[in-house]
Amino acid sequence: MARRPRPRTRSSSSSVRRRKTKSNSSWLIKALIPLLLLAGFLLSSYVGYLDYTVREQFEGKRWSIPARVYASPVELYAGLEYSSKSFEDLLLQLHYRQDNQLAGEGSYLIKGGQASVRTRAFNFGDKLQESRKINIRFVGGAVASITDVGNGAELAIVRMDPIQIGSFYPTRKEDRILIKLDEAPQTLLQGLFSTEDRDFYHHFGVSPKGILRAMWANVKAGGMVQGGSTITQQLVKNFFLTSERSLTRKVNEALMSLILEYRYSKDEILEAYLNEIFLGQDGGNAVHGFGLASEFYFGQSLKTLNLSQVSTLVALVRGPSYYDPRRNQERAMERRNLVLDSMLEQGYIDAQQASEAKKQPLAVASVTHRSANRYPGFIDLVKRQLKQEYKEEDLTSEGLRIVTTLDTRVQEALEQSIAAKLKQLEKSPKSNDLQSAAIVTRRDSGEIVALAGAREASDIGFNRALDAVRPIGSLIKPVVYLTALEYPDRYTITTPVSDSRLEIPAERGKTWSPDNYDNREHGVVPLHTALTNSYNMATVRIGMDVGLSRIANNLKNMGVSRPVDLYPSLLLGASPLSPLEVTQIYQTLAGDGFATPLRSIRAVNAADGKALQSYPFTVRQAVDPAATFITNTILQEVMRVGTGRSAYNYLPGEMNLVGKTGTTNELRDSWFAGFSGDYLSVVWVGRDDNKPTGLTGGSGALQIWSELMRQISHQPVTLVPPDNVEMKWIDAATGWLTGEGCGGARLFPFADGSGPSEYSECGSATDAAGSWLNHLNPF
C-alpha cells in the first residue's frame, strides 16, 4: 500500500514566514541605522554651520556704516547779505519741509520777508546744537534780525545744520543711521507688533499661530494684508540670506531664526531689526533701518516723528517700492491707515488718535536724493586728505561724520561760471574741446570753499585741479619779483630794469634767448612796469641776477613741495605745477607773506558725534612781508592797467583786486590767479591733448575768474603795509621824490631806507643831480 505524503502543518509555514520577515526587518534596520546616523550627523553639522554663521555675523561688526561728508555749515547773523530766496534754497537742499505748524524739526514757513524755522539738532563735535524754533527777518536782500521763538531773545548768530554732500560707501552700497532700542518711539514698536508680529515676545523664531492667523486674514480680505513671517524671520532674510524664493531658503530662514532666538535676547533681535530692515532706495544706495528712513522720507530724526509718520514707515516694511509715499501716495496712505487700524485693534491707540492720524497728509520731504557725491572733484580732495590719517576701511565702515570747508553757493557759482564761459570761448574757431580746473579759497584762512576738476560738474574721472600738472607761465613772475624785492638794497618798486634781448648759455653750447609776447623790446622800465606788463626779458634779467636757487627756495617756502629744475626757463613758468599748488603759492601772497596750508576739512567726528580730530587754522611766516606787500601793490597795478584789466568789466573799481595772468608757449595753457578781500581763486583753461587753445591768460581763464568773483565777492582788498614799509610820493617820469600835489606824482611803497633820496624840481628839495637811469641795474 502506497504511503501518502504527510501534509505540511500551518504552524510550520507561519514559522518560515516569520523567520523571513524577521530576517528582512533586521536587514532593513541595519541598513537604515547608518543612514539615519549619517543624516543626523549631516543635519547637526549643517545646523552647527548655520549656528556659526549666525554668531560670526551677529556678534561681529554687524554693519559697515559709510562716512558722511558735509559742507561747511551756513552761519546766519544780522547784516549778512542773504536773501529770503537764498535761505529757502538752502532749506530745500537741507531737505526741510514746509509746515505751517512747525510740528517737527526740519520744518519751515516763509511769508514775504519773514522765515519761521524749526532747526534740526546736529552734533558738530565741538558742540551739540539742539533743535529750536527761530524767526528770521530779511530786509533788502540781507538778514535784519534773528529771534529765538522760545524766549523772544535776539540771537547774534545761528549755525544751520550742514548740507550732506557725499558719502564714502563700502562695496555694498548700503546706508543706515544706527539707533538703540530705547531711542525708538513706542508707536513704532507697537505698529510693528500689530502688523508684522503680534506674538514677538512669545514665540521661538517661527510662529505657527501667526502663519494661520495671517492666512485667515488674507482670505477674508481677498488679498495680502498680513504676512506670516515673524520679525525674527524678516531679520534673518534681510541680514543673512538673499531674496531668492525657494524651499531651501525658507528652511534656512526657519532654522536660523530658531538659532537666533536661542542665542540672543528678544531686545537684541528687535534692535538689530530696526537697523537692518530695507525701507527704500536712494538712487544706487539702499536705505536700511528706521533711523535713516526717517531722514530720507521726512527730513527729521526718528524720535521726533508723529503717529502718522511712524505708521507710514511701518507701512513700508511690506514693500518699500510698492508703498513708496513719493511715487504711490494713495497706495501708501491706504497701507498707513491699515497700520493704524491694526494698532487700534490691538489697543495701542484709541479711536481718536487713529482718526486724527488718518487725517494727516503723508507730508514727505520733496527732495529724494540725499547721498550722492554731488561735487566729485571736491570729494576726491577730501578723501585724499583723509587717507593720510585714516584707513580705507575706517572711511567706509565706521560711520564717520566729516565736516568740510565747502561752501555750496560758491561751488555752484563756480560750476555755472565755467559752463557759461567755456561755451562762449568755444565760439572762436581756434578754441574748442576746452577743459578747465579751478580752486576757490577763503583769503583769510586758506579753507577751500569750491573746487572744479573738470568743466562738467559730475565728471568723476581725471581731477585736473589736483592732477593736471601743466606749465604755469607768467604766474611764476610774482615769485621772481618778490624774491628780488627781498633785497631792497638792489631792487625796489621803481628800480630801472632793462627789457632788452639777452642770450643765456644753455646745454651743448647752445643759447636761450627769451622773447616778449608782443615780440618787442621795451627798453629801460621801472620794475613795477615790467611786472605789470609781464615783460619776459626784464623778468629773466632780474631772476638771473637774484639767482634761480633763491627763487626755487621761495617757491618751497610758499608751499610747493614738488622739486623744480633750476633752468633759466623756470623764470617764465616752464616748470609744471597743478592748480592746487598754484593756489598754495597765491594763498601765501594773499596772506601777506604768511603761509596757511590749504584745508578742505574742518573736523572728523565719530558716528555718535564725538570729536575725533580737528584741523585748526595754522600759519607761519614764509617770505618777507615787506617784499610781499610791495609785490601785491604791483599786482593791483596789473589789474588796473596791465594784463588783468578786463576784470573791471565785471567788478567795480573799488575792489582793488590783486592778480596775475599766465600764458604758456603756443597758447597751450591759459591761467589766472588773483584775490579780492574775501576770496582767492585760481583758474586754468586748456586741452587734455595739450594742443593750442588760442587763449591767453587774459582772454581765457581771467574771463571765468571775473564772472565767478562777480557773483561771490563783496569785500575789496585793503593792503596794510608792515611797520618796515614807508610810502613815498614819486615822480613817475624821473623816479625821484616829489610832492603829493606835483604833476605825475604817485605813491609807492619802499622798505625802510630803500627809497630814493633825490627830489624832483616840484619836490621839497631841488637836489636833482642826474637821472634815475643812472641807477639802472647793470645785468
Image: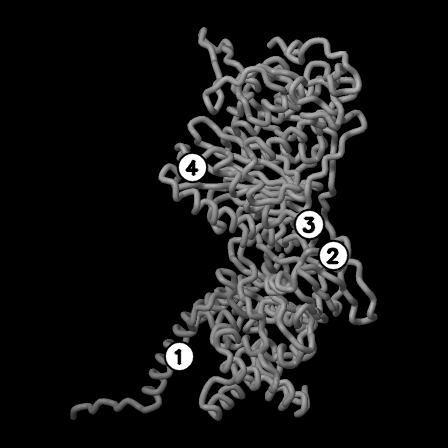
- Badge 3 local density, few (<14 within 10 Å), some, or many (20+)? many
Secondary structure of residue under mark 2: loop
Compared to 589, does 348 lie above or below? below
The CA span between labels 3 and 1 is 79 Å
Residue 511 is situated, as x and y percent measured from the top left of the image, at: 46, 10
Residue carrying label 2: 79
Secondary structure of residue under mark 3: strand
As drawn, the label of residue 604 is 3
Q: Quadrant of residue 158?
A: bottom right
Residue carrying label 4: 687
- Badge 4 local density, few (<14 within 10 Å), some, or many (20+)? some
Compared to 190, does 663 lie above or below? above
Q: Look at label 4 and name its amino acid.
A: Arg
Residue in the image at 40% along x and 35% along y: 689
Q: Look at label 2 and name its amino acid.
A: Gly
Q: Look at label 1 and name its amino acid.
A: Lys
- Number of labels in the image equals 4
The CA span between labels 4 and 1 is 94 Å
Q: Is residue 320 visible?
A: yes
Residue in the image at 49% along x and 17% along y: 514
Front position in the image: 604 or 314 = 604
Residue 30 is situated, as x and y percent measured from the top left of the image, at: 43, 71
Q: Is residue 106 left or right of residue 280?
A: right
Residue carrying label 1: 22
The CA span between labels 3 and 2 is 30 Å
* Mark 3 vs 2, N-terminal side: 2
Q: Look at label 3 and name its amino acid.
A: Val
